[in-house]
Image (tube, coloured by chain):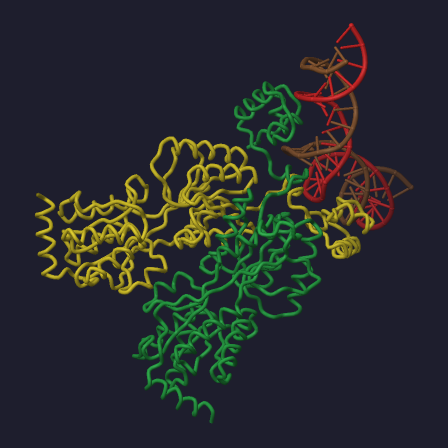
Chain colours: A yellow, B green, C red, D brown
Amino acid sequence: MSEATIADVARLAGVSSATVSRVINRNYPVAESTRARVEAAISELGYVANAHARALAGATNRTVAIIINDLIDPFYAYIARGVEREATAQGRLCLVCCTHGSHEQELALIDLLHEQRADAVILVGGAYEDRAYAAQVAKRARALHASGSTLVLCGRPGVGDDAPTKVVEYDNEGGAFAITDYLITQGHRRVLFLGGPSLFSTTIARLAGHRRALELRGLPYDESLISPGPLSRRFGYERTRELLAEGPGFTAIFAANDNVAAGAMQAIEAAGLSVPADISVAGYDDVPLAQELRPQLTTVRIPLEEMGRQAVQLALGVADGSDYLSPVRTTTRVGTSIVVRQSVGAPSAKKALAAASGRKRAGR
Amino acid sequence: MSEATIADVARLAGVSSATVSRVINRNYPVAESTRARVEAAISELGYVANAHARALAGATNRTVAIIINDLIDPFYAYIARGVEREATAQGRLCLVCCTHGSHEQELALIDLLHEQRADAVILVGGAYEDRAYAAQVAKRARALHASGSTLVLCGRPGVGDDAPTKVVEYDNEGGAFAITDYLITQGHRRVLFLGGPSLFSTTIARLAGHRRALELRGLPYDESLISPGPLSRRFGYERTRELLAEGPGFTAIFAANDNVAAGAMQAIEAAGLSVPADISVAGYDDVPLAQELRPQLTTVRIPLEEMGRQAVQLALGVADGSDYLSPVRTTTRVGTSIVVRQSVGAPSAKKALAAASGRKRAGR
DNA sequence: ACGAAACTAGAAACCGCTTACTACGGTCCT
DNA sequence: AGGACCGTAGTAAGCGGTTTCTAGTTTCGT
């Protein structure tokens, strides 16, 4: 039950504890013969240093923490993997915490991790636009900063310019623009934007990109073609089923993420229609599910793992290399790209007609 | 950069540091007025206790660690989720580490977590049968035990009776038995066992269950129908393709896990055959992928998340409830059950014939 | 009104390790 | 030969809490 301490080792080796510490840390010259004796004592006692005492006495904790929504969700899991890998590469341990969607839990976790003196706390995932909440996060960012740690926002909006945070973003607006434009290029004129909580940061950005593409192509932005909701497969299924029953006023669906797209595809199939012959579907995120669907889903790829790595590098102030003269970076943006698979095609004449009539109805 | 300490709070509140500690921990009576003053001081300074100092001074670290292969793999992710949730429920933080398949990394991580004085270290996933390696793990189990921590083996074989570990098992042999028996009941006589590294603990157990079912039904155990290999989709695909080209001597495939099954199904489809009309396929694990495949995969379900929870409860010695008189449990076994979906059917007469001829060839 | 019991609060001893500072013997150089 | 240096090793002061004792006040009971 009681562990050997550095003092025990010192006694056994006939040296002082300082010498043992030096042998372990190799940060001070120690005679070869002494070193040998100390190492023998260490292995005889099975001595393992106490990380807490070590951290207390000055050395850093060597831990990076990441706060995500849920480990199962591949979107988060990939980011977590990037963080974990980079943390390991930097000789850090990785603490993974899940909020399961609760804001209070998230704030509580930041505090807990602050107590743990993590080298960095990485906060992942979209957030609701909520000023009070942002203020809470900003406050904690300052607290962390005060104790030499860093709060990194990964794929979520900033919390005010004065908050000392670092940010890793990805191009939500650009990806949405690109894929909407792709749909338009394929001939679609009436595209349903499906899912995504209205006040959610990523929804807002994706919707903005969608809208910009429409405007650039001179297509109307029709409120009736925007159908926000949860980012779940169930919602995608249910809502699509309802809309299909009403007589669809669209030939393509741009789902706010792949889950929603999967639900939509299921509903379309269930209605006896086919993807993409009757209705095209595009998603966002490119999670593994996208490749399992039949037809395989055309979607927007986000370099998730890379984001995780960047977050750690940013937090730890790892030199960028590309421009080593610049001061420590505080923001990184990774690009998104569309992945063309089989779920998008040209609208059929018949369906386009139906869409047009649906449009009249919607316009009534 | 410099954080407020308990002494700062004490000074500001005009009390001793002992009193501040008591206010925080609520483990000793403190006058209401004093408490108020201390709390005011704490919030004014934004004081956050130093977890290391705290851990050093006696209180536990309140951290549970889990070591898995890879965060992305749903098999591990579900277990990790169970661990994370239960740890949170027990007021612990959860440290997640990945080995990415490396033994040395695994051992190194155990040491690292030992240093961190984690309340428990949970080791997940099958392991190669390797005496030297088991001895290494046993040694660390003893070291952890000596410092009041616990090593929990989750879904992997023990490392010797004298090693102070706790174990959460699932019924690999029984699940394999059940599903093989199910295949036989459906009329299959020649079942290919596909994938799983030969010396891997889970492979061995699954193969044993498979074999027992064959024997119980009076069917021969044919070495040529055992085709071990990696637990990957690629392997499932490639190997199935090869075997199909040789003329299959089987009407059903029992894959060592769902990934392998997915690969096999792909290969069967690519060969112009259909599942289950021509060849039936069964998997193991019931990861989400199983439900995405078409036809949906008949497989063996393991209560992964539950295993994670059990591991934490076991480690922390949480009362079982069911028999609170018993001493602290040291082993838990969770059951497995087969999930019938659409990938298994009766063998067609024609294919059964082909299988029989294949059998002659194989026997030659 | 007096002593005991019940509250509160402080002093100080750790917890186990790092590290600045000090000490000491031997080399090397002038 | 004597002092400047170099290479090693020890001493001890923290790091920031927790907790055991000790002690001063009240509150009561009789």
- Residue at the limit of the structure toward the bottom, as seen here: B364
Above or below: residue B51 compared with residue A351: above
Displayed quadrant of residue B165: bottom right
In this rendering, position of residue A81 left or right of residue A30: left
Above or below: residue A323 compared with residue B168: above
In this rendering, position of residue D23 left or right of residue A131: right
Displayed quadrant of residue D18: top right
In this rendering, position of residue A137 left or right of residue B314: left
In the rendered image, residue A240, in percent from the top left (x then y), is placed at 22, 53
Above or below: residue A345 compared with residue A173: below
Question: Between residues A341 and A1, which one lies in front from this camera angle?
Answer: A1
Q: Residue at x 43, y 64 (%)?
A: B286
Q: Residue at x 43, y 47 (%)?
A: A323
Question: Between residues B203 and A251, which one lies in front from this camera angle?
Answer: B203
Above or below: residue B68 compared with residue A235: below
Q: How many marks?
A: 0
In the rendered image, residue B76, in percent from the top left (x then y), is placed at 49, 59
In the rendered image, residue A154, in percent from the top left (x then y), is placed at 41, 45
Question: Between residues A131 and B157, which one lies in front from this camera angle?
Answer: B157
Question: Between residues B253 and A289, which one lies in front from this camera angle?
Answer: B253
The quarter in which the C terminus of chain A is drawn is top left
